[in-house]
């Protein structure tokens, strides 16, 4: 090969020689990445990219005050980045000329966003060489928005997953370039599904980024039908309505476990229900008012009547205390059969 051949021609020749020799071609080049994320959900993806590409900067939301002493604590992604010696930035907003100039100075191939919590303006989306990628915890366009994990469980969905998309200014509207799917079991709660999807996000985004730019060449636009928004979770909506059927309340409890925790007012005060499963009403009584205590099961679980069937409750958390088994709670509460677990406060059950 003469010196007049271009670098591209030499690379093509090397690829052909590698194939003929039976050896795999060289891996794709490392991408220079600005990572944006805040909660623990984003850490598996960041950890994967640190090991496989060049993460030149990490952006996270500012530290929050929390706990009894209201101490300022870095968010999980910021803490991880600091421990790894990565440059960390925590702006309140990305909507300023100064921040845009700072982001431009990183000379990034990609911005990778996982649960960051701040909107990226159009001017920021246009900065990186290959655009901005987002890993979203649902099979888009179902469950766009803030709380896709909880909403999928609450709705009784049998499946969810991860969508890797090219970001647009709309909320989770961008075309999809990668998908991973997972079943939602009857034993999954928000915590277990969160952890599984966090790992799938790292796997999905990692595969897409390894394949850049080819992996971005033919994105799939999201369908116009099937769009559902996953509104942010509030403690108030986690309140238990015992008039609902037991299978509906099972989904409700798993969706909000461990946080904020599905709750009601028990005869001894406010109570979070952390683990439960549907069951048929016991032989006696066959008819019981919704929200009434039906006694213990043979293994010490607590039975509460619902609008249809009953719930077998195995783990609870009284206000101001740590979580405990329902059996331990009943040992201290000494409830009478027929005692009510009200959906809201009233003088007789405070």
Image: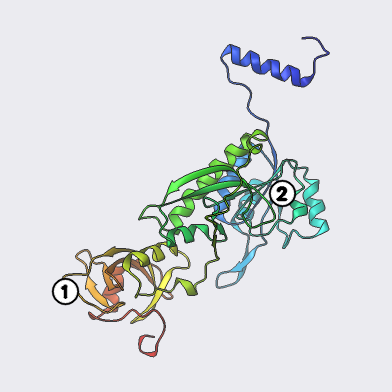
Q: Are marks 2 and 1 in contact (CB under 8 Å)?
A: no
Mark 2 and mark 1: span between their CA atoms? 64 Å
Left/right placement of residue 236 relative to residue 168 reads left
Left/right placement of residue 1 relative to residue 149 reads right
Instruction: State which tag comes first along the sequence, 2 or 1.
Output: 2
| Residue nearest the observer in this picture, 91 or 212 | 212
Mark sitting on residue 87: 2
The local crowd at label 1, few if under 14, some if 14 to 19, many if 20 or more residues have their Cα within 10 Å, is few
- Residue for point 71% across, 49% down: 87
Q: Position of residue 55 (x, y in %)?
A: 68, 42
| SS class, disc 2 | loop
Q: Quadrant of the C terminus?
A: bottom left
Q: Is residue 119 above or below residue 219?
A: below
- Residue for point 24% across, 78% down: 288
Residue furthest to the left in view is 283
Question: Is residue 14 in view?
Answer: yes
Residue annotated with mark 1: 284
Q: Residue 286 sits in which quadrant?
A: bottom left
| Residue nearest the observer in this picture, 104 or 231 | 231
Q: Quadrant of the N terminus?
A: top right
The local crowd at label 2, few if under 14, some if 14 to 19, many if 20 or more residues have their Cα within 10 Å, is some
Left/right placement of residue 187 relative to residue 46 reads left
Left/right placement of residue 37 relative to residue 304 reads right
- Residue for point 16% across, 74% down: 284
Q: Position of residue 227 (x, y in %)?
A: 55, 57
Question: Is residue 275 in view?
Answer: no
């Amino acid at each position: 090969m003469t010196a007049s051949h271009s670098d591209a021609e030499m690379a093509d020749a090397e690829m052909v020689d590698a194939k003929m020799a039976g050896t795999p071609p060289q891996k794709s080049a490392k991408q220079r990445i600005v990572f944006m994320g805040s909660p623990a959900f984003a850490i598996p993806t960041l950890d994967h990219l640190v090991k496989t590409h060049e993460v030149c900067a990490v952006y996270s939301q500012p530290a929050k005050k929390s706990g009894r002493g209201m101490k300022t604590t870095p968010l999980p992604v910021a803490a991880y980045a600091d421990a790894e010696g990565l440059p960390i930035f925590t702006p309140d907003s990305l909507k300023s000329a100064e921040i845009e100039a700072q982001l431009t100075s990183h000379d990034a191939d990609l911005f990778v966003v996982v649960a960051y919590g701040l909107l990226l303006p159009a001017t920021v989306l246009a900065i990186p060489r290959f655009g901005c990628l987002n890993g979203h915890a649902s099979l888009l366009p179902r469950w766009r928005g803030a709380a896709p994990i909880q909403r999928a469980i609450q709705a009784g969905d049998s499946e969810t997953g991860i969508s890797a998309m090219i970001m647009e200014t709309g909320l989770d509207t961008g075309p999809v370039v990668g998908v991973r799917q997972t079943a939602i079991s009857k034993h999954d709660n928000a915590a277990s599904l969160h952890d599984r999807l966090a790992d799938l996000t790292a796997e999905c985004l990692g595969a897409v980024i390894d394949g850049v730019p080819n992996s971005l060449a033919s994105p799939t636009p999201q369908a116009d039908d099937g769009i559902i928004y996953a509104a942010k979770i509030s403690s108030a909506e986690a309140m238990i309505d015992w008039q609902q059927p037991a299978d509906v309340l099972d989904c409700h409890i798993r969706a909000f476990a461990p946080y904020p925790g599905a709750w009601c007012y028990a005869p001894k005060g406010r109570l979070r229900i952390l683990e439960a499963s549907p069951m048929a009403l016991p032989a006696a009584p066959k008819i019981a008012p919704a929200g009434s205590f039906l006694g213990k099961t043979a293994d010490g679980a607590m039975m509460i009547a619902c609008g249809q069937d009953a719930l077998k409750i195995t783990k609870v958390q009284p206000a101001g205390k740590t979580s405990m088994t329902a059996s331990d709670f009943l040992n201290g509460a000494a409830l009478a059969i027929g005692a009510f677990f009200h959906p809201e406060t009233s003088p007789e059950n405070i």
